[in-house]
């Protein structure tokens, strides 16, 4: 079952169970997938593309939660947090720092002969890491490890 199919099936389950947080979160992701499909005609999303939609939706909810908390609107902040938690269930298992470090070492060594300067090597390493391990690591941790390994 693809990630898209899983989301669509879980949306129906959430509706039947009257789970408002799951229903709302999955509905918005479903809408983004459908919107992208209609915009491009016969586009069939891969799991990686659906994952990007989910990651973006999580970030939006986390930002909204922060805004609501600052405004003293705890009920809305809690709703955003609940929806983000539902969507996080669709993310792949996060990598440990050691796994990230090993992957960055491997990627940077592969790119060493291709890229001429350190700054370009850092950028290419992060880009390649994101292609291979999309959604499996916090970007700030990856950047920090790339700085450690590749240097300044």
Image (tube, helix red, strand yellow):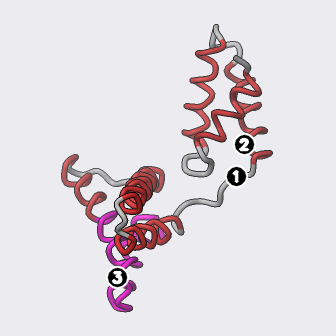
Residue most extreme to the top: 116
Q: Spatial distance from mark 1 to mark 2, Cα to Cα?
A: 6 Å
Q: Is residue 146 rendered to the left or right of residue 14?
A: right
Between circles 3 and 2, the one closer to the viewer is 3
**Residue 87 drawn at (x, y percent):** 46, 66
Magenta stretch? 1-30
- Dot 1 corresponds to which residue? 95
Q: Earlier in the sequence, mark 3 or mark 1?
A: 3
Q: Quadrant of residue 7?
A: bottom left
The residue that appears at 40% across and 77% down in the rendered structure is 22
Element marked by disc 1? loop
Element marked by disc 3? helix
- Dot 3 corresponds to which residue? 20
Q: Does 74 sit above or below residue 128?
A: below
The residue that appears at 31% across and 66% down in the rendered structure is 30
The answer to if 90 sits in the magenta stretch is no
Instruction: Name the one closer to the observer, 143 or 125.
Output: 143
Checking the image for residue 100, the label placed there is: 2
């Amino acid at each position: 079952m693809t990630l898209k199919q899983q989301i669509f099936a879980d949306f129906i389950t959430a509706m039947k169970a009257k789970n408002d947080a799951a229903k709302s979160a999955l509905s918005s992701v479903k809408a983004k997938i459908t919107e992208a499909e209609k915009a491009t005609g016969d586009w069939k999303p891969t799991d990686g593309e659906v994952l990007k939609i989910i990651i973006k939706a999580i970030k939006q909810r986390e930002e909204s939660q922060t805004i609501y908390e600052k405004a003293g609107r705890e009920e809305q902040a809690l709703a955003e947090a609940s929806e983000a938690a539902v969507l996080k269930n669709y993310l792949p298992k996060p990598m440990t720092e050691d796994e990230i470090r090993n992957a960055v070492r491997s990627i940077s060594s592969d790119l060493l002969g291709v890229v001429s300067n350190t700054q370009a090597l850092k950028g290419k390493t992060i880009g390649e890491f994101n292609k291979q391990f999309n959604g499996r690591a916090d970007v700030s941790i990856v950047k920090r490890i790339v700085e450690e390994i590749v240097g300044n």
